[in-house]
Amino acid sequence: MLSNSEVETLLSWDRISSRFRLLARHYRREKPSIKDTAFREVYGELIRRIVKSRLPHEPWILKTDLWNEGVENGRNILSLVRGASGKSEIVGVDISGNVCGYARRELGDDIEIVRSTLLAPPFCKRFDLIIDISTVDHIPKRLRERWISNEASLLKENGVLLISFDCKLNIFCEVFHQLFTRRYYPEWTLSPVSIRQQLNRYGFQVLEEHAVFILGLFLGTHRPWFPFSRLLNRMRVIEAVKAVELSKCSRLLAFLAPQYVLVAVKTNS
Ligand SMILES: C[S@@+](CC[C@H](N)C(=O)[O-])C[C@H]1O[C@@H](n2cnc3c(N)ncnc32)[C@H](O)[C@@H]1O
């Protein structure tokens, strides 16, 4: 059973999202911001690789929240997934009715949107790929175990989980969360070691892991006055940063990068 504060946390997203949607529309610009481009580039590349090397034809793909599609839609990931995965079934879920509504307006009819949560998944289907980009770090601590165990149950054997979260090893990120983020919405930094252990407990084998979204460290990149914006927004710079982030040694950057991503396959053990 959920406690009152857990219920409050889950229900808070309708209120939070309408506020952030207004802000995001206010800052909407002709050209995507540095952060938005960097975000889509690194996650897009990882997803394209997984689709190419691990998924069957006509895969079933699930994304665990729709914030990137409905609120901060400069970071729309599902349209990239649609482009990369051809004839696939794509489902996006979110706990917030508002976020689902906003995403519905932005996405084509060929992506199914379900107001729900992986804490109590409504599916009898199982998936080939689950994309959890920083949803897990919004789940209250006590419920996180159930979240990951449900991700395991919802995957087919040899299905792939892409899971990312704000990284506890980055002190700047931790302080930013404590002073700023948590005043506006529930989110916690997580440690790569504890997520890796949880994945192992539920029969996952980690295929690769990276510290990512280094450009997300710069505050104010959505403002026109940001000092290095023209330099940083060059595709060549973003591509170079992505190459470092997706290299084998990028884990060493976990003290600097705001997010950490693990790609894991579900085995039958
Ligand atoms: C601030 S956003 C961050 C996630 C986003 N993918 C990103 O990259 O920043 C959090 C999103 O997760 C959704 N969410 C929070 N808790 C959830 C839950 N238990 N089940 C499903 N969605 C949830 C919220 O409604 C919101 O759309």
Image (spheres, grey):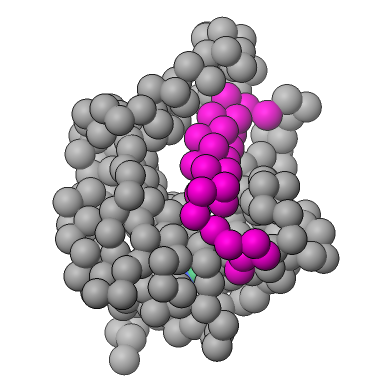
Residue interval drawn in magenta? 32-60
**Does the stretch in magenta take in 90?**
no
Residue at (57%, 51%) from the top-left corner? 51
Q: Position of residue 139 (x, y in %)?
A: 36, 66
Residue at (21%, 64%) from the top-left corner? 200
Q: Quadrant of residue 229?
A: top right
Q: Quadrant of the C terminus?
A: bottom left
| Above-or-below relation of 105 to 3 | above
Q: Position of residue 201 (x, y in %)?
A: 20, 70
Q: Quadrant of residue 143?
A: bottom left
| Above-or-below relation of 116 to 46 | below
In the image: residue 194, left or right of residue 85: left
**Does the stretch in magenta take in 42?**
yes
| Above-or-below relation of 168 to 227 | below
Q: Position of residue 20 (x, y in %)?
A: 59, 50
Residue at (57%, 82%) from the top-left corner? 125
Q: Main secondary structure of the magenta part?
A: helix
In the image: residue 71, left or right of residue 16: right
In this rendering, the count of numbered labels is: 0
* Observer able to see residue 160: yes
Q: Position of residue 89 (x, y in %)?
A: 68, 68
Q: Quadrant of the N terminus?
A: bottom left
